[in-house]
C-alpha cells in the first residue's frame, strides 16, 4: 500500500513550506504501519484514489516539482525541507525499513532533490546528503542523475563527492 499526500502549490512560499512539513509529519507517523510500503507527495494534485500507482518520475508529477523549483523563492525552503527528509531517513535507518521509498523506482525526496540540484549547483550537497542515506542497493535513476549533475555543473568538489559516493555502488 502507498501513502499519497496531495499538496497544492498556490505560489505562496510560506504555505508551501507548511504543507511540505505537514506532509513530512504524515510520512513520519506512517512509518510504523507495516502495510505501507511507499510514501509519496503528489504536488500536481492530479492523482485520485483508484488511479494506478504514482511514480514521481512520471508526468504530471515530475513537472509539478520542476514548476515549484522554477520559482527561485521556493528553492531555499525546499532545500530546508529536503534537509528534514535526510534527518527523517537517518532517524529511521535502524528500524526494519532501511529506506523510505516513494515507488519501487524512486527514493523519498529523489525527484525534487534531483531537479533542485540540477537547477542550481548550490544544492548539489543536499543531493549528496540524500545519496548518503538512500538505499543505493535499490537505486534506479540516481547514477544517471549524478552523471547529469556533472554534465550540467562540471567537475568540482561537490560533483566529485557525488562520483565518490556512487563509485562504491557501481
Image (tube, rainbow, N blue to C red):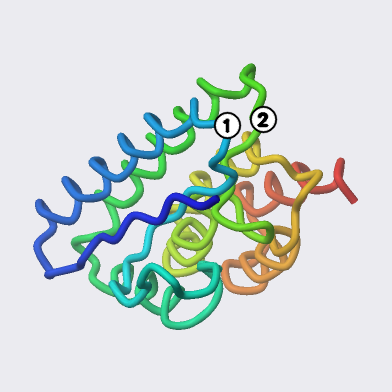
Q: In the image, which disc is placed on residue 34?
A: 1
Q: Residue at x 16, y 45 (%)?
A: 18
The secondary structure type at the circle numbered 1 is: loop
Dot 2 or dot 1, earlier in sequence: 1
Q: In the image, which disc is placed on residue 71?
A: none
Answer with left or right where residue 168 lies relative to residue 38: right
x and y percentages locating residue 77 in the rendered image: 25, 49
Q: Which residue extends farthest right?
A: 170
Query: Which quadrant holds residue 34?
Result: top right
Q: Residue at x 42, y 64 (%)?
A: 120
Front residue of 157/114: it is: 114
Answer with left or right where residue 167 lies relative to residue 26: right
Answer with left or right where residue 44 lies relative to residue 37: left
Give the label, 2 or 1, closer to the camera. Answer: 1
x and y percentages locating residue 58 in the rendered image: 54, 78
Provide the residue designation for mark 2: 98
x and y percentages locating residue 81 in the rendered image: 33, 43
Q: Which residue extends farthest front?
A: 50
The secondary structure type at the circle numbered 2 is: loop
Query: Which quadrant holds residue 22?
Result: top left
Answer with left or right where residue 73 lies relative to residue 120: left
Q: Is residue 71 above or below residue 165?
A: below
Q: Residue at x 48, y 30 (%)?
A: 31
Front residue of 33/133: it is: 33
Q: Residue at x 51, y 20 (%)?
A: 91
Amino acid at each position: 500500500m502507498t501513502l499519497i499526500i496531495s499538496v497544492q502549490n498556490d505560489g505562496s512560499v510560506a504555505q508551501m513550506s507548511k504543507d511540505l512539513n505537514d506532509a513530512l509529519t504524515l510520512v513520519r507517523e506512517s512509518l510504523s504501519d507495516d502495510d505501507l510500503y511507499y510514501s509519496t507527495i503528489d504536488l500536481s494534485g492530479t492523482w485520485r484514489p483508484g488511479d494506478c500507482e504514482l511514480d514521481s518520475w512520471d508526468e504530471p508529477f515530475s513537472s509539478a516539482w520542476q514548476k515549484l523549483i522554477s520559482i527561485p523563492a521556493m528553492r531555499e525552503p525546499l532545500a530546508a525541507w529536503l534537509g528534514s527528509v535526510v534527518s527523517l531517513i537517518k532517524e529511521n535507518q535502524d528500524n526494519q525499513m532501511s529506506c523510505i521509498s516513494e515507488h519501487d523506482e524512486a527514493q523519498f525526496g529523489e525527484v525534487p532533490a534531483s531537479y533542485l540540484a540540477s537547477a542550481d549547483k548550490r544544492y548539489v550537497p543536499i543531493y549528496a546528503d540524500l545519496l548518503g542515506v538512500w538505499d543505493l542497493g535499490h537505486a534506479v535513476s540516481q547514477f544517471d542523475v549524478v552523471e547529469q549533475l556533472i554534465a550540467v555543473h562540471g567537475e568540482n568538489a561537490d560533483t566529485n563527492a557525488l562520483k565518490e559516493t556512487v563509485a562504491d555502488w557501481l
